[in-house]
Image: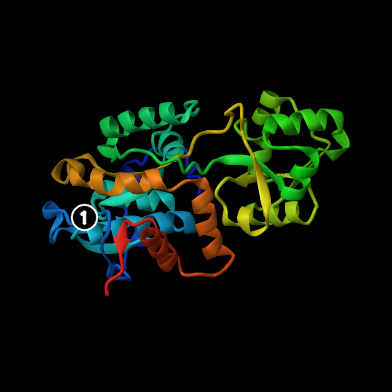
C-alpha cells in the first residue's frame, strides 16, 4: 500500500515468508546502458553486484531507476528488482538482503515499520528520528533525505484557487469561514475518520465542512476537476495534479506527517560501500515535488515508460550520459 499504514513492525511471521511470497521472482538487468556524467566511476564498486528494489507505484519505481542508473554509471553490476508488490514485501527484501538499495519515505518508516502512533513534526526532526531508530532497531541506514515530500494535502482547481486567492490551508479556512456554502470536500473513507485525517486537520485549522463526499483515491482528482467538490484530499506529488492543472494548498501549520523520500540500505552494506552516499545523495537533493509530479504525470497521464522518464531526467541533470 502506498502509505504503508500497516501499523506493524515486521515480525517473525513475515520474516518467514518464502522468496516467492514476496513476489521477487524476476531478476533483470538495468534497461539501458549509460555512462558517467557528474557521477564518476567508483573503483570500490567496480563489478560489485547491487540489487535495487522499489515498491509498485510510479513514483517509487522512478526513484528506483534513478538509483539503478546512477550505480551503473559508477561501475556497479546492477540488478533491477523494481515494482515489488506491497510495501511490506519490499521492506522485508531489504532487511533480508534480497535487495540492497531502496527509496523509502520517512513517515512510512516511522509510523508503519517502526510502529509509532504519532508522527514527529518537522521534516528534519522526522528524518532524524527514523534514521536513528531504524539503524538501532533493524540495522537499516537512511541516506540524506530529499526535498521530495509526498504527504497529504488539500487540492482544488488552479482556476478556483486563483479566483479566491487560495495558496495555503489557512487561506482556505479563512475563505470557508466567510463562505461556508463552498465547503464541499471529497475524501477517502479512511481519511474521513482517521484522527490524523479529516477530524484532526479540521480541528487544527478550524474550517467548516458543509458537505463531505467519499471517493476512492483516484476518483478524487477527477471529482475536483469536474467540480463535484471544491476541495479534496490529495497526495502532493501525484501526477494527476499536474495533468488536471490542480493546485495543492500548502499545509502551513504542518499538520500532516512528513513523507520525505530517502535512499535506504542496510547499515552493514553502507559500511562496506560508503561511496553510496556520494553517488545517491546528490540525486536526492536534486529532485523535488514539482519535478517528481511532472515525471509522475509523464508516466501516469501521458503513458511514457518509467525507465525512459527516469533516464531522461538523469541525463538532463547531468548525472549520467548516454553512450555514443
* Residue drawn where x is 30% and y is 64% of the image: 321
Identify the residue under disc 1. 40
Residue 61, percent across and down? 42, 58
Bin the neighbour count of mark 1 within 10 Å (Cα to Cα): few under 14, some 14-19, many 20 and up: some
* Residue drawn where x is 27% and y is 54% of the image: 38
The quarter of the displayed image where residue 223 is located: bottom right
Question: Is any atom of residue 67 visible in this view?
Answer: yes
Quadrant the C terminus occupies? bottom left
Residue 225, percent across and down? 74, 55
Decide if residue 182 is on the left or right side of residue 42. Answer: right
Decide if residue 117 is on the left or right side of residue 37. Answer: right
Number of residue marks: 1
Decide if residue 180 is on the left or right side of residue 55. Answer: right
How are the residues colored?
rainbow
Viewer-side residue, 272 vs 197? 272
Residue 118, percent across and down? 50, 27
Residue farthest bottom in this picture: 324
Viewer-side residue, 273 vs 165? 165
Residue 46, percent across and down? 13, 59
Question: Is any atom of residue 208 visible in this view?
Answer: no
Disc 1, SS: loop
Q: Where 66 sits versus 136, above or below?
A: below
* Residue drawn where x is 37% and y is 32% of the image: 130
Decide if residue 55 is on the left or right side of residue 27. Answer: right
Amino acid at each position: 500500500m502506498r502509505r504503508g499504514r500497516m501499523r506493524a513492525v515486521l515480525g517473525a511471521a513475515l520474516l518467514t515468508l518464502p522468496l516467492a511470497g514476496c513476489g521477487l521472482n524476476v531478476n533483470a538487468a538495468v534497461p539501458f546502458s549509460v555512462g558517467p556524467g557528474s557521477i564518476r566511476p567508483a573503483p570500490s564498486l567496480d563489478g560489485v553486484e547491487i540489487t535495487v528494489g522499489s515498491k509498485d507505484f510510479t513514483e517509487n519505481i522512478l526513484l528506483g531507476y534513478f538509483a539503478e542508473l546512477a550505480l551503473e554509471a559508477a561501475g556497479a553490476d546492477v540488478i533491477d528488482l523494481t515494482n515489488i508488490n506491497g510495501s511490506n514485501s519490499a521492506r522485508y527484501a531489504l532487511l533480508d538482503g534480497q535487495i540492497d538499495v531502496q527509496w523509502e519515505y520517512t513517515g512510512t518508516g516511522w509510523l508503519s515499520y517502526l510502529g509509532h502512533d504519532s508522527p514527529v513534526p518537522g521534516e528534519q526532526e522526522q528524518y532524524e528520528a527514523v534514521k536513528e531508530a531504524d539503524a538501532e532497531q533493524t540495522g537499516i541506514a537512511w541516506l540524506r533525505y530529499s526535498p521530495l515530500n509526498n504527504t497529504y494535502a488539500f487540492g482544488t482547481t488552479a482556476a478556483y484557487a486563483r479566483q479566491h486567492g487560495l495558496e495555503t490551508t489557512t487561506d482556505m479556512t479563512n475563505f470557508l469561514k466567510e463562505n461556508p456554502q463552498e465547503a464541499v470536500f471529497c475524501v477517502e473513507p479512511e481519511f474521513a475518520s482517521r484522527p490524523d485525517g479529516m477530524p484532526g486537520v479540521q480541528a487544527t485549522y478550524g474550517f467548516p465542512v458543509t458537505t463531505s463526499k467519499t471517493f476512492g483515491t483516484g476518483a478524487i482528482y477527477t471529482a475536483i476537476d469536474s467540480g463535484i467538490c471544491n476541495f479534496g484530499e490529495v497526495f502532493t506529488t501525484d501526477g494527476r495534479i499536474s495533468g488536471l492543472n490542480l493546485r495543492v494548498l500548502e499545509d502551513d501549520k504542518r499538520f500532516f506527517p512528513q513523507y520525505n523520500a530517502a535512499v535506504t540500505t542496510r547499515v552493514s552494506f553502507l559500511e562496506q560501500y560508503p561511496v553510496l552516499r556520494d553517488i545517491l545523495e546528490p540525486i536526492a537533493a536534486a529532485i523535488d515535488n514539482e519535478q517528481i509530479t511532472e515525471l509522475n504525470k509523464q508516466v501516469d497521464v501521458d503513458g511514457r515508460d518509467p525507465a525512459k522518464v527516469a533516464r531522461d531526467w538523469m541525463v538532463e541533470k547531468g548525472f549520467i550520459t548516454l553512450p555514443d
